[in-house]
Amino acid sequence: MPALRAIVRYGYAPFMMLGLTAAAYLVVSELAVAGDNPWAYLWLAPLLVLAYATAFGAEKIAPFFDEWNDHHEHGDTPTTVLHILVYEYQSIVGVVLIPVICWLFPFQGLWPTQWPLWAQVIVAFVISDFMFMIMHYISHRYAPLWRLHAVHHGVGRLYGMNGVMRHPLHQVIDMIIANAPLVIIGMPVPVAVMLGFMISITLIVQHSNVDARLGPLQKHLSIGRIHHLHHVNWGTEGDCNFGLLLTIWDRLLGTFHEKPPREITAKDLGVDEVPNFPKGYVEQFLFPLHYKPGQGEPERYRKPAEPAPTPAQEARRIVDAAE
């Protein structure tokens, strides 16, 4: 078991972010583009399923916190699955709309379409990584956006399946800010598909309950403990480490913190003023309508106070304590 745990700790991130991304690239470049077969994009679906299955298995073998693996205790798995389906559906719709966007904004020609596909994918990801980081930073500073983004932060644990958990409206805004400009200047569909796949894989790895060891890259990737600090419910102490993958943008902005001021426990995640964050998808969808930052927990989420003990109960408690 120790040997298997070591394999998972050191092999999980490379397999997910390099192995599965390489497999997706072959599907897009060889089958979809070179083979002129748009239906080949459907092969990315089983690769995503494999990614979630790999995360689920790795979390059992080498978890950060065993408590985060207790799916029954947290009771959020069905809702998380719905979030995954909505997220991926919106991503597909975004790709389908690319021809429409190009028609509405005929500023094509700026994108380096003459470059190799792999180079275009890298450029697209780095730009999106920066744009998502800026959008993420603003979402923590601007109350209307925080009300939407708090849906992502409300969960009390991190695991692979809730990496893409977010309010649908916030995802739309993310896509408009981070991806639409690339499409407007000419980013082609194959690059957009690869970009969407890579973002999904990054979010899965970033939120996985896997004690991944990244070696010299530990300080440069927003994965594991670095991202845990971003999710703590310690007031504003989590307003750091906004990067999607790279920490360089946080370093430039002055929002990078490598180590937490104190040890992070399994119960330190969530939104501090909403300890009873709703579990159901519909309630999470409506959450921004009821949650007002700085005004405490909305009434509809508060647990009813326990009634005061009767004189007889209080007398019994005193007797029991004396015995």
Image: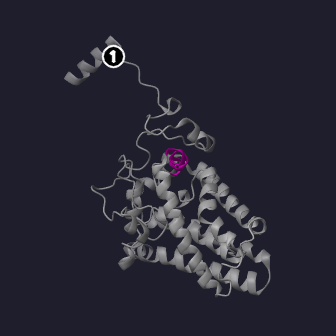
Asked if residue 316 lies left or right of residue 271, the reply is left
Residue with the mark numbered 1:
313
Q: Is mark 1 on a helix, strand or loop?
A: helix
Q: Where on the picture, by quarter, is residue 44?
A: bottom right
Is residue 37 at all visible to an observer of this figure? yes
Q: Tell me the amino acid under the disc marked 1.
A: Gln
Is the stretch drawn in magenta largely helix, strand or loop? helix
* Quadrant location of the C terminus in the rendered image: top left
Q: Where on the picture, by quarter, is residue 242?
A: bottom left
Q: In this view, does 275 lie above or below 221?
A: above
* Quadrant location of the N terminus in the rendered image: bottom left
> Residue visible at 57% across and 58% down?
164
> Residue visible at 53% across and 65% down?
131
> Residue visible at 73% across and 74% down?
41
Asked if residue 26 lies left or right of residue 101, the reply is left
> Residue visible at 49% across and 45% down?
143
- Give how far across and how far down residue 13 sits, in percent: 48, 74
Q: Please name whichever residue, 61 or 210, is drawn nearer the observer in this view of the structure.
A: 210
Q: In this view, does 157 lie above or below 224?
A: above
- Give how far across and how far down residue 8 sits, in percent: 45, 73
Q: Please name whichever residue, 118 or 278, is drawn nearer the observer in this view of the structure.
A: 118
Q: Please name whichever residue, 46 or 203, is drawn nearer the observer in this view of the structure.
A: 203
Q: Give the range drawn in magenta.
A: 143-152
Q: Outermost residue toward the left?
A: 322
Q: In this view, does 220 lie above or below 52?
A: below
